Image (cartoon, grey):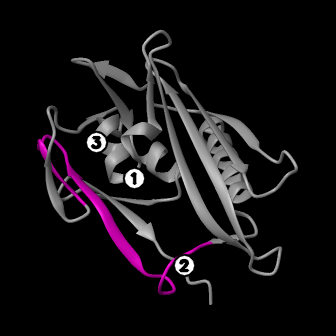
Amino acid sequence: MRKYLLRIITFSTLLALIFSFSVPLAMGAGQRDLKARFKIDDQICLINGQSVAMSHPPFIKNGRTFVPIRVLAKALDLEDKNVIWDPSSRSVTLVKEYQTVSLENAGTLKTVVVKLTIVAGSSTMHYSAQDLSNSVNNSANNSIELDALPEIINSQMFVPLRFVAEAFGYEVNWNAEERTVEIWDVKISGD
């Protein structure tokens, strides 16, 4: 239990560091947009309002929902070129660039790049963020211990959905009655 709480605190601290003094450019304070809905054991998911077929349905293992990484990357608006598979290490690196408004520097625009590397069978997820608009090297690197191991099934990597989606700043909700997981993009106004 203590190890789990330490992981949550570490992860939360890292997210706070990455998004400190920044507000995502968006419309409408507190507005939430449904990005994706996955139903356990259903090969059809909903991504940005469109039905998407998966070759293997999401499943639960050790209390965590696993989904194919490529489908999850699509739900998180990652382009194919930003999902990098390394067969020698059996790892995938996800890269996402954010445009943010800096509260620290009178509302100037800055670019933050977030990288997440996941290795099949490893309990460690590597996470980094770098402010590209600042000439000072201010990247944050961290390792997060997972309580559910990513795995490869039929040549596809499956990852714990919540850890990956939350690492990129999305909100994740579980509906036990319907056995669905929803990913929400929370919009914050720059006003």
In the figure, 105 relative to 126: above or below? below
- The span picked out in magenta is 24-47
Q: CA distance from mark 1 to mark 2?
A: 17 Å
- Is the residue under label 3 in contact with that under label 2 (CB below 8 Å)? no
Report the amino acid beneath label 3: Val
Q: Residue at x 35, y 38 (%)?
A: 63
Q: For residue 188, which numbered disc appears in the image?
A: 2
> Per the image, is 41 magenta?
yes
Disc nearer the start of the sequence (1/2): 1
Disc nearer the start of the sequence (1/3): 3
Q: Position of residue 52 (x, y in %)?
A: 15, 49
Q: Quadrant of residue 126?
A: top right
* Residue highlighted by disc 3: 71
Q: Position of residue 155 (x, y in %)?
A: 26, 18
Q: Quadrant of residue 5?
A: top right
Q: CA distance from mark 2 to mark 3?
A: 26 Å
Q: For residue 76, which numbered disc appears in the image?
A: 1
Q: Residue at x 42, y 13 (%)?
A: 87
Looking at this view, is 83 or 187 the one in front?
83
Q: Dot 3 surroundings within 10 Å: few (below 14), some, or many (20 or more)?
A: some
Looking at this view, is 108 or 120 the one in front?
108
Q: Position of residue 91 (x, y in %)?
A: 47, 21
In the figure, 126 relative to 53: above or below? above
In the figure, 21 relative to 58: above or below? below
Q: Secondary structure at mark 1?
A: loop
